[in-house]
Each structure stands twice: as structure tokens, then as C-alpha cells.
Image (tube, rainbow, N blue to C red):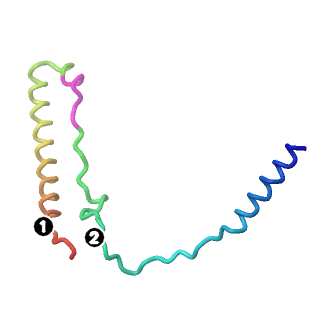
Amino acid sequence: MKLNLLLLLVLVATSALAACSSVPEIKVPERVLVPTPVPCVDPAKRPPAPQLRAEADLLAMDRYRRTLAAWQDLKKHEAYQAQLEAIVEGCSRIPTAR
């Protein structure tokens, strides 16, 4: 008897809550008055990271080849870093919206 009464009470409470809930109409604002961050670089135009050798690959080489490979990786990394610095410099010069 108590279980049936409890189930009936839960059923009435949930139906009352369901009747009260309605989906409000959502309006998308036409203007945003708060500064919103936007990417200044298109992700497709980001320079790809260079493929550098792993430490295990370098250690598997003899000293002469390892030295040349390490210098080659260093120069690849320096070129990549220069590209990233140029992008950051360009992004930092974009005036902020007021």
C-alpha cells in the first residue's frame, strides 16, 4: 500500500514538473558587445612542425653522421622557429577591437 502511494506521488510530481517545463525561444545576438577572441592565423596556414630525429636514431649513428644530423635538425628547428616568430609578431600588431 505504501509503495503504491509513493509511486503515485512520484508519478504526480514528475508529471507536474514536466508540464511546467517549456523550451524557451533562443535568440542569437546580432552584435557582440564583449570582446571575443578570434584566431588571427588560419589553422590551415600554420607552418607544419619539422620532422626531427629521435634521440635513439641519433645514438644509432656513428659520431660523424650524428653530428651532421644534429646540425641538420637544428637548422630545421631554427627555420620553423623563425616562421612562428613572424606569425606571432604579425598577430601582436593587430589592433584590439574597442
Q: Quadrant of the image for the N terminus?
A: top right
Q: Which residue is mark 1?
A: 93
Residue 89, quarter of the rendered image: bottom left
73 relative to 56, above or below: below
Q: Residue furthest front?
A: 2
**Horizontal and vertical percent position of residue 5:** 85, 49
Considering the numbered disc 2 on the image, is that residue within a helix, a strand or a loop? loop
Q: Which residues are magenta?
A: 52-58
Work out whether 6 lies above or below 28.
Answer: above
Instruction: Please tell me whether residue 93 belongs to the stretch shown in magenta.
Output: no
Q: Dot 1: what SS?
A: loop
Give yes or no for contact between labels 2 and 1 (Cβ–Cβ under 8 Å): no
Q: What percent of the width, then of the height, locates residue 85?
A: 12, 54
Residue found 21% across the figure and 74% down from its top? 97
| Labels 2, 1: front one | 2
Give the total number of marks visible in the rendering. 2
